[in-house]
Image (cartoon, helix red, strand yellow):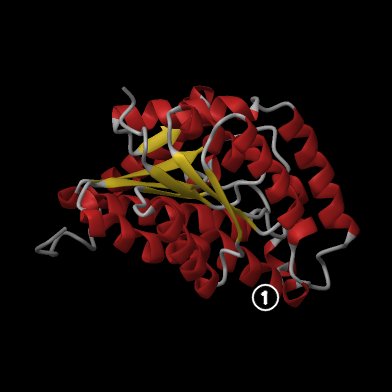
Amino acid sequence: MSKFKGKTAIISGGAEGIGLSVAKALGEQGMNIVLTDIDQKNLEIASKGLEESGVPVLAERLDVADEKQWQHVAKKASERFRKVHMVVNNAGVGGDSVSVDNQEKKGWQWTLDVNLMGVVYGAKTIVPLIKSHGEGGWIVNVASMAGMGGFLHGGAYNATKAAVVALSESWAEELTSQNINVSVLCPAFVKTRIYDSERNRPKEYKSEISGSESINSFRRKTKKMIDNGIEVSIVGKRVVEALNNGELYIFTHPNYRSEIQKRFKAIDDAFKDSEKSIALKESPDK
């Protein structure tokens, strides 16, 4: 019998893409699903599809950048399913992709509030529920391959995804004694609509460059790469597999290993350089 059967998962950004793929995969394992998303229409469609496949579902609209809305979701989840065992912090946006000298505060703030603070609020709100029943559970944070090595003109996105990786490593160490397992999903290109995050961008985050031709051109190029990515259904199955194996880092694109190894080698070489440092010779803790 699946160790997930009868347990409850809260999933942000679950109306489509990776979030819905994970919801379907966990539902197949017998989990209750609390499906959340900022897009009410798509949320209703997704939750209906899950219900028709026999998955117990609670659908709640959620803007992950609003901590009070997280608290509302937690309350509703507890009322419906009593115990909560997992949070999947999946909701994310692509942000503005621009050069360093063309960045704007509103674009950065949007990306920070959703990609980073949305994860912080999700864990802050749901972890106490997981702790309360003493049965242990899971946190799954969705980062990106960009969290392992950034791409050109992706400043805000790269920064937030790297932060999610670091948070996951910290929380994994903090929560292991309480039988709460933490994993961070780092996919490369998957067939989702991350390139079209603008559709859900609140007006308070609109910037002067958000609709510019340079931004739109980048989105078109990104869409082409994403359209050649892996099928999103694979990701949910991979997450279940990784959770069963207790994996901290969940990778979906093993072909990126050589690129990441280049970064690790550069870091290792930098340590070798520090060992030769004349300035550090007198340091007692070098």
Q: Is residue 232 above or below residue 280?
A: above
- Is residue 276 in view from this perspective? no
Q: Position of residue 216 (x, y in %)?
A: 86, 52
Residue carrying label 1: 105
Q: Nearer the viewer, residue 99 or 187?
A: 187
Amino acid at dot 1 = Lys
Mark 1: few, some, or many residues within 10 Å (few <14, many ≥20)?
few
The vertical placement of 174 against 108, above or below, is above
Image check: 55 left or right of 15? left
Q: Position of residue 14 (x, y in %)?
A: 60, 46
For the point 65% across and 68% down, which residue is it? 110
> Which residue ends up furthest to the right in the rendered image?
213
Quadrant where the N terminus lies?
A: top left
Looking at the image, residue 250 lies above or below residue 73: above
Q: Nearer the viewer, residue 25 or 185?
A: 25
Q: Secondary structure at mark 1?
A: helix
Say which residue appears at 12% left-offset and 64% top-offset. Answer: 282
> Measured from the top left, where is residue 117 in percent x and y?
50, 66
- The outermost residue toward the left is 284
Nearest the camera: 172 or 161?
172
Q: Position of residue 97 (x, y in %)?
A: 72, 56
- Disc tally is 1
Instruction: Give the residue displayed 80% in from the left and 40% down from the top.
Output: 221
Q: Can residue 196 be seen by looking at this rendering?
A: yes
Residue at 43%, 46% in the rendered image: 9
State the quadrant of the C terminus.
bottom left
**Image quarter for residue 66?**
bottom right
